[in-house]
Image (cartoon, coloured by chain):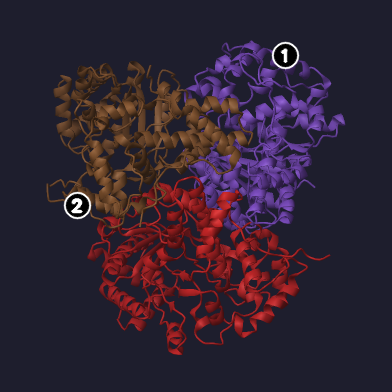
Chain colours: A purple, B brown, C red
């Protein structure tokens, strides 16, 4: 029995009502081929450091590194070992890539109607030209087809970067990173615009695993001997300057809560010394992070780096799984977040200063209309980031605009970012955004809420201009 | 003036756009006549214990036992006495069933566009063949029509059970219940599949009204003299084994919060002794419940009973009304619930074990996308129950899929349950689910998110297979 | 280059699907010209006190008093000084009204697809006959057109009041207000029905800025020497009676949280004395407000004034901006609100009494389906107010009905209020409500959820009758 031929609808994600669909298609076509602005993501810069870097085999490209994928498989009882996820203790895991691929294919139905399913389908169909639906029967043939292509020059990362029409791609890098792959890209003469992002969580959050080593490493790479709060700040300033020299336009900060608040210099020093001595407690960590977020906003006003703030993820919720497989095993779970009172210290001190761009991301959608849109719709410095993580999805985008737009408008948001480590999924992710946004605007047009002239401008802003401007890619 | 004829649209609850409507109808027709799986509900098993049991008169069938109905009437100023709701003190209430019915009919407009209104209309039209809209004018004629039918053999509960196509129906029963009506059903030789569910809240929650009597009763029915924590656990194990023998495949647990957490054996014993001595406080109760939820998960792994957890209802919010009319008077009100931190102890200990099926229900929809879908989309043991209580409604189901599906997928959910004590409303409730789900999937098809082949499989899973599998009806 | 002609779609805000649109239009046409009931708002009564009062120039009519407007402009970096907003210290701000208007027009694109944008467009097009889109090019011509009309008798407030078809308009007035403009309206013989609303926050909330002066003023205007709790209550009773004599049918109360709870007479007296002595703390203020909300409910049962309760706004979030420009500068930000436990004391004491109408408003939409609809769907005294402030918008209204209707029904809600100080925007605001509600009901009809007969009744209830009945305009 032949598998049904597999293809994507040219009108996918558009409402079926013919007038709205027609307008959505027009809007989409006006932006479908615009270059991709990728201002926040987790692609490994090594992929671009030399011409020969490769995406690996189909399993190591699509499954092993992608916690969006193996999370779902795990939820249905498939052990991570069987998917080839490395154990921290180096214990045995499945190494037969075709066997892993087979399991994945047999369970591909789990992703029906999910963003991961849509991205994977788009990658397979549009990037790799697969024309039969992935399932247990077609698994091995499709593996062969992808593997064959991955061996060709057209499927090297640099070639795909150009084929995808990426105008700029940023990575996310620890404060202690020496950015050697970024340097290698520069040195290679290749013209792809790839930039680092300064992510200092591992040194700023004094309860991070390995904080002491991170601080030692910070001393090393910054050339500043970090032994107190003042030298800690100096070292961070050195790293920010270095990142900026290497092309960074932004920083990124993650925290479980949105708390901000300044310590006195004495308090900051006392907590830092307790941390160095290994005697800081949870409250110290919480207050120090709240303080450092403020410090970073102050530094951003000085050096012009855009500041991103991602909050609301309870990391490594599944302790037994974390113990075996470590971080990023698919068990980060969102929590309720308070923004109005928590961000007030920062916004009162820096939020009225238009030199600052402070972009906030949430995993708690109930705050969109209640707290975040009103805040972004008032403070000149604040912008609201696109729907993040679980909400980078068709309904996630729809809910975002429904909840945010009427209060914050379009221009207090910053377009899209793909936030992915799965490089070949980038075009699919931007395509979902561009289609869903086109359909949103078409829906406003057919309801007489905006006119076609406004919609034509807004779709370009949403798909391209806002991200470029907010992240200061000039 | 003739009343307009009353009928149900054959395309009800489907989107009006013709393509989506056509696909929705096809999907619906493929499942409309599948048997009904009813894995969670509150129908009185006595109705099936012998061939002659009856649903009573129209008022005692549709109004008096249904807090969904009289809640709304009460909210508009109609006293519960006037609706024949019994007082705890045995004081006078309206006994004229036709008078109560008249009030109900005159206020039937209050239910316009509500699920209760839709269920009642479907019952009246489809089960009882009523063809004029219920209002003050038609009230008494319709009462006569229903009463006449209820007197016939075709409207005995067992006959309706068969006519409704119920494959399996579960009741909800206290841990101390001797299940005599379930035994009577078995003994009668009637083939209807009716099973108990083990609901131990009244003995597990040490602050329950009447807890001491409940514990005495537990000793009696279990044959275990419950005098300390160890014997309490033994008695519970005895009851679980008994329920399982009687056909139970599941337990059900209700709590105001989602808190879980283990006590040490010494702590458990100490709290239990304080409870026996009447000296336990609110904190004891909270911690003991949190502990017992963990214990029950452990027992479920042993005995294979599916574990249901319903949280978030502030019971008996209206103290003056509760004082007069007792529990289930329509004044249970939801509260905000935290799941991520609260469920962590249980999920860390048992959530990675695929032998456990742990189904969670919420009255706080803001947790769907933020906490529950991510948890159900990760832990192998956890599933998310269908929209519960106030959310068993057209928009409730729509919001549920919109918020949950993209993160948890279809296969970490468990289909539908009707959760009702109103036996004749069962087909109407499943019909709403099947129609709304058909329309949801049709919406995905016309938007190119899934294909028709996937939709055809998913609707059968949603309408029938998932509930059957999750509750282990084999 | 000519500007595109600017007009409103006659089918605006209706779904594009033709059947739904046709029914929506029919429903809308049945209520489009019904009189406007305006039971809650902030229009200055001075506008109607004499025949010659004027709306001022275009800038002082549309921009300066409207924090919905200048909030958005400020969020994009335009200083409030540049918009002519007065400083508390009397410092210089822009006084050139045409220059302010030009800035506004150049940034009018910020309001694309927002309710403020829709209201402004409707005002300009329908009230002032503007036919070119407002932007930097058309700004001055449009200013001229509006200014010319504002100088004519047809654009005096009283003339517009009649042209708009306002049946009744209420203002919001401090407890200490002598209502001289309301008296002037009465004395003038003009027949417009304009009524005060009793808003005692500034004397009830002991942490209000200027509370001591407010209490002195209360003594003055009430004729009761307020020196202890008993005389405080007497003075409030005097003011309520005075407001009622002046036509008031309602009171309004604002609080950051929904907390209610009675103090003992001794506690109330003790806190009141601490407040008089300037020694009350934040906890005193919180408990006193919670108590006074209860007292006010009790007084409402006595005097029949409808009680409104608006909660959830963190006032003056932006301290530096507040320090310069004072209250109502666009920096009030919502916070998460708990209702179930917080309202219980009040609802348990007064909520079962149908003499009370207690209307609750929220800025936390997550409470709609979880707490507010269940409460309003149970307690006879409680009603849920329409979507407030940021949620008085197309999507805000849609979300409100989606989340509330299935639990609370239509008849536990109270229709619409415009809540505005922008008098010329009143028709546009009611028109949005009437259109969105028509479309909501049409959506229910085409989905077979209600029939056309029900929809025809419900739209009149929503657009007119419910507000009139709830606020006891007889």
Badge 1 element: helix
Task: Classify A391 as above or below A296.
Answer: above
Q: Using the rendered image of the protein, determine whether residue C263 is visible from the camera's viewpoint.
A: yes
Can you give x and y, in whole percent of width and height, for residue A397 in the image?
61, 42
Residue C460 falls in which quadrant of the image?
Answer: bottom left
Q: Quadrant of the N terminus of chain A?
A: top right
Q: Residue at x 65, y 84 (%)?
A: C151
Q: Which residue position holds label 2?
A: B81
Residue C351 falls in which quadrant of the image?
Answer: bottom left
Can you give x and y, in whole percent of width and height, for residue A230 in the image?
63, 45
The residue mark sitting in front, 1 or 2, is 2
Task: Classify C7 as above or below A303.
Answer: below
Badge 2 element: helix
Q: Residue at x 46, y 58 (%)?
A: C456
**Left or right placement of residue B164 versus residue C7 in this view:** left
> Tag 1, which chain?
A
Task: Classify C182 as above or below B4.
Answer: below
């Amino acid at each position: 029995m032949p598998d049904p031929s597999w293809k994507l609808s040219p009108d996918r994600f558009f409402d079926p009502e013919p007038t709205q669909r027609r307008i959505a298609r027009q809007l989409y076509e006006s932006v479908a081929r615009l270059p991709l602005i990728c201002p926040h993501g987790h692609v490994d810069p090594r992929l671009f450091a030399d011409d020969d870097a490769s995406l690996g085999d189909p399993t190591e490209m699509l499954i092993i590194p992608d916690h969006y994928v193996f999370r779902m498989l795990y939820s249905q009882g498939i052990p991570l070992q069987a998917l080839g996820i490395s154990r921290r203790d180096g214990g045995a895991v499945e190494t037969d890539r075709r066997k892993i691929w087979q399991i994945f294919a047999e369970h591909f139905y789990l992703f029906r109607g999910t963003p991961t399913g849509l991205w994977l389908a788009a990658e397979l169909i549009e990037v790799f030209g697969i024309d039969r639906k992935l399932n247990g029967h077609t698994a091995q043939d499709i593996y062969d087809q992808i593997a064959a292509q991955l061996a060709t020059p057209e499927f090297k990362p640099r070639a795909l970067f150009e084929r995808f029409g990426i105008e700029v791609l940023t990575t996310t890098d620890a404060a202690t990173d020496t950015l050697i792959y970024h340097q290698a890209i520069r040195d290679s003469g290749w013209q792809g615009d790839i930039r680092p992002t300064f992510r200092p969580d591992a040194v700023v959050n004094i309860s991070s695993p390995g904080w002491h080593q991170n601080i030692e490493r910070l001393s090393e790479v910054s050339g500043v001997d970090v032994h107190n709060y003042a030298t800690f700040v100096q070292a961070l300033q050195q790293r920010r300057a270095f990142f900026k020299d290497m092309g960074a336009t932004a920083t990124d900060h993650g925290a479980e809560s949105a708390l901000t608040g300044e310590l006195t210099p004495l308090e900051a020093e006392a907590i830092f010394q307790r941390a160095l001595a290994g005697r800081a407690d949870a409250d110290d960590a919480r207050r120090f992070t709240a303080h450092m977020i403020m410090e970073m906003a102050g530094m951003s006003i000085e050096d012009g780096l855009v500041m991103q703030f991602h909050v609301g993820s309870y990391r490594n919720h599944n302790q037994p799984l974390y113990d075996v497989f470590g971080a990023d095993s698919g068990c980060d779970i969102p929590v309720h977040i308070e923004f109005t009172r928590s961000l007030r210290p920062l916004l009162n001190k820096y939020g009225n200063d238009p030199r600052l761009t402070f972009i906030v991301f949430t995993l708690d959608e109930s705050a969109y209309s209640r707290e975040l849109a009103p805040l972004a719709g008032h403070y000149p410095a604040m912008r609201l980031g696109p729907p993040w993580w679980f909400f980078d999805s068709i309904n996630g985008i729809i809910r975002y605009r429904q909840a945010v737009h009427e209060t914050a408008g379009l221009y207090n948001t910053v377009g899209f970012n793909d936030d992915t480590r799965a490089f070949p999924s980038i075009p699919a992710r931007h395509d979902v955004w561009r289609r869903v946004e086109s359909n949103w605007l078409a829906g406003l047009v057919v309801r007489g809420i905006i006119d076609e002239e406004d919609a034509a401008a807004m779709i370009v802003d949403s798909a391209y201009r806002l991200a470029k401007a907010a992240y200061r890619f000039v």
